[in-house]
Image: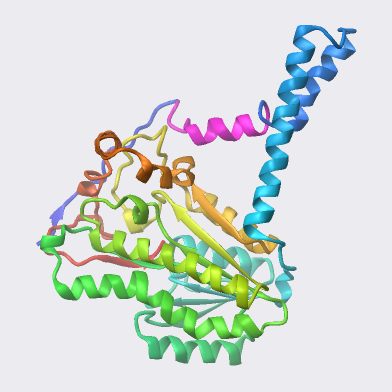
Amino acid sequence: MSTPFTTPPQRDSWFAPLSIDLLVKVLRTSFFHPFIAWIVPLCFRAQNMHWDATPMLVSIGWAAFISLCWIFGTINNRLAFGLPREVDLSEEVIVITGGASGLGLLIAEVYGMRGATVAVLDIKDMENGEARGVTYYKCDVTDKDEVARVAAQIEIDLGTPTVLINNAAIVNGKRLLDLDIAEIEKSLSTNLLSHFYTLKAFLPALARSEVGGTVVTISSVIGQTGAARLTDYAAAKGGITALHKSLAAELRESHPQIRTVLVTPGQISTPLFYGVQTPNAFLAPVVEPVDVAKEIIKAIDNGHNAAIGTPLYARWIEWYNVLPLGVQAVVRRIAGVDTAMKTFVGRNGTKMSEKNGGLIQGF
């Protein structure tokens, strides 16, 4: 039986929106931006300060250092991700799994309003009933035959798919000892095997598309760190991260016109993890779906290969596994990663008991 459960209290205060991500964003557009950095020595020169004065030399050195960092960053991205493909939204057919709600629905609505052709695959009806430019297909992504059938129908109805966004996910939120085999199989089928099914169904179409294509994989930092009550989810997310990296390596050799985008977010403010409270809103803020959607849409629009991590700690999470094991244990306790799921609630606002089913939907 599920027990009534109220949402954990929110941290309402004047500094609630303040986070390390916000500070870094401000610094990147001010103190750490080459344009701003070079304004400082120019201002000194406008005051008739000599070129060999200490403030002038320090400011020039700082501006040169920041400029070199930006140049090296650009070169690094070019070496890592190559040249972008040309994207014309009027020619794009975008397929989104788990797109009936949350992050998937947001991306679908944005592209639908911008004139792209969008197909949403989901086992449940769309939250908003319908959206401009979006065609809904009822599809269980854990059924490979159904995925293949819907893929063929999309090509007939909408044209050759050019973008595949694998977004469908399920969360059980139980300890391994309380999961039954059927729940484990359902979780792995939805969170991992479905990626193989959709890739096998849609990747051939992306490969023969004249405008190229883009594959977007929505993973999670949990795939790198693991977490209590998320054994099945973490195993699947770690698997799709490895799947994506291997696929990207294959496509660079066989189909260089196809771009790949790996998204590894932290906790997103969607019903998938409803009720889970971040232990530190400053260092590990909950990410709004619109912020993740903007990064994904930017990568697709620009035709880039990309690796998207948000918030800030998600971009550095792989370094966690380099730390000594003792330090890792301390970090886990401080972060509260293994206790966060204790406040996890279902979509109906009831606490998930050990015998309840999981929450199934897209991010």
Which stretch did the figure color magenta?
A: 15-30
**Residue at (63% x, 77% y) in the render:** 255
Q: Is residue 133 visible?
A: no
Residue at (61% x, 74% y) in the render: 253
Q: Position of residue 29 (x, y in %)?
A: 67, 33
How many numbered discs?
0
The relative height of residue 247 versus residue 263 in the rendered view (above or below) is below
Quarter of the picture holding the N terminus: bottom left
141 left or right, relative to 353: right
Q: Position of residue 71 (x, y in %)?
A: 73, 41
Q: Is residue 12 magenta?
A: no
User: Is the C terminus in the top left, top right, bottom left or bottom right quadrant?
Assistant: bottom left
The quadrant in which residue 102 appears is bottom left
Q: Position of residue 10 (x, y in %)?
A: 33, 37
| Residue 281 vertical placement versus 212 (above, below) | above
Chosen colour scheme: rainbow
Q: Is residue 92 left or right of residue 273?
A: right
Residue in the image at 30% along x and 42% along y? 277
Residue 23 belongs to magenta span: yes
Q: Is residue 154 visible?
A: yes
Q: Residue at x 48, y 32 (%)?
A: 20
Where's residue 275, x and y in %?
Answer: 28, 49
Q: Nearer the viewer, residue 178 or 103?
A: 178
